[in-house]
Image (cartoon, rainbow, N blue to C red):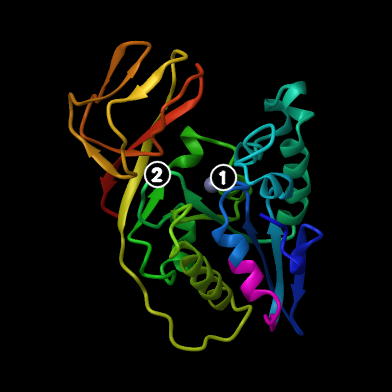
Amino acid sequence: MKIPKVIKNGYVMKKGKESGPTSVIIAGNHGNEACGIKAFEKILPTLVVEKGTVFFVLGNPEAIQQNKRFTEANLNRMFRKASTYSAKIKKTYEYKRAQFIKMIMKEAEVCLDIHSTTNKSVPFIICEKNAKNIVQYFPKNFTKTVSGFGDIEPGATDDYMNLQGKVGICVECGQHEDPKAEKVALDTISMFLQTRGHIKSKKVLKIQTRKHIQMDTLYYSKTDSFTLVKKLDDFYEAKKGEVIAHDGGKEVKMKKDSIVVFAHDRNKKGEEAFLLGRWVKK
Ligand SMILES: [Zn+2]
């Protein structure tokens, strides 16, 4: 998609008259996830921040223009320590873009990163306990919170913020093509700005109760031929012993009852093929 005129330089900073907290909101971290970008387009022309500072950042402008997830490397894995990356990765557009975004994130206490999913999915929130006071007011479209990504899939914006002792939140607003995703993104931004005190609350925000999932496994394809036995919606509940895929002809069997997220066929060894988690009580 085209870069919206209101944010053509890659980010917009809105500063209130009153001093206050600083937040970052990112859209288009993955270039083919339009809901957050469209929400920016709607909200920015008239938004007046009253308190503190808010940075609205386009994650990956190059990929957005090409309508691709990324151009050379997944931007949302580029936020680990510099020493963990190869020289080749450091030359990529996404690695360089991450360094720029990190500079903005350094100014803020909280980062909200807006995404959508490839698989059929319900909106959900990725965060740790430190985000509870903020995400509890997010729209009721989000039926679950999911934790533990930082340990098994490091390098996302939320992981980066959490490791600095700050708060990182990622929202998955529905499937890429879901027309409702944009509204979910818009409502989330509005509630985020209110809870953070950047704008006055129009009405008293309601606390939502949600189910909670702890992620514990990330499976990388072991061969160039990883094929799911069937298309799996996010949060598919697989039973112990169930075969969900074949990897180089070998069965990929569940060791215990598991919730499957982000499962995709892969034709290259060493790619993220699916994640597993389990229900937990808060
Ligand atoms: Zn994404």
Q: Is mark 1 on a helix, strand or loop?
A: helix
**Which of 211/61 is in front?**
61
Q: How crowded is mark 1: few (under 14 residues within 10 Å), some or many (20 or more)?
A: many
For the point 50% across and 16% down, the residue is: 269
Q: Which of marks 2 and 1 is nearer the N terminus?
A: 2
Q: Is mark 2 on a helix, strand or loop?
A: loop
**Residue 103 relative to residue 265: left or right:** right
Cα gap from disc 2 to disc 1, whole angstroms? 22 Å
Percent coordinates x, y for residue 91 in the rendering: 79, 29
Mark 1, ligand 1, within 8 Å: the answer is no
Q: For the residue marked with disc 2, what is the amino acid?
A: Asn
Q: Mark 1 points at which residue?
A: 159
Q: Which region is colored magenta?
A: 39-50
Q: Residues within 10 Å of mark 2 (few under 14, many from 20)?
A: some
Q: Name the residue under label 2.
A: 119
Percent coordinates x, y for residue 141 in the rendering: 37, 66
Percent coordinates x, y for residue 41 in the rendering: 66, 69
Q: For the residue marked with disc 1, what is the amino acid?
A: Asp
The quarter of the rendered structure image containing the N terminus is bottom right
**Which of 138/223 is in front?**
223
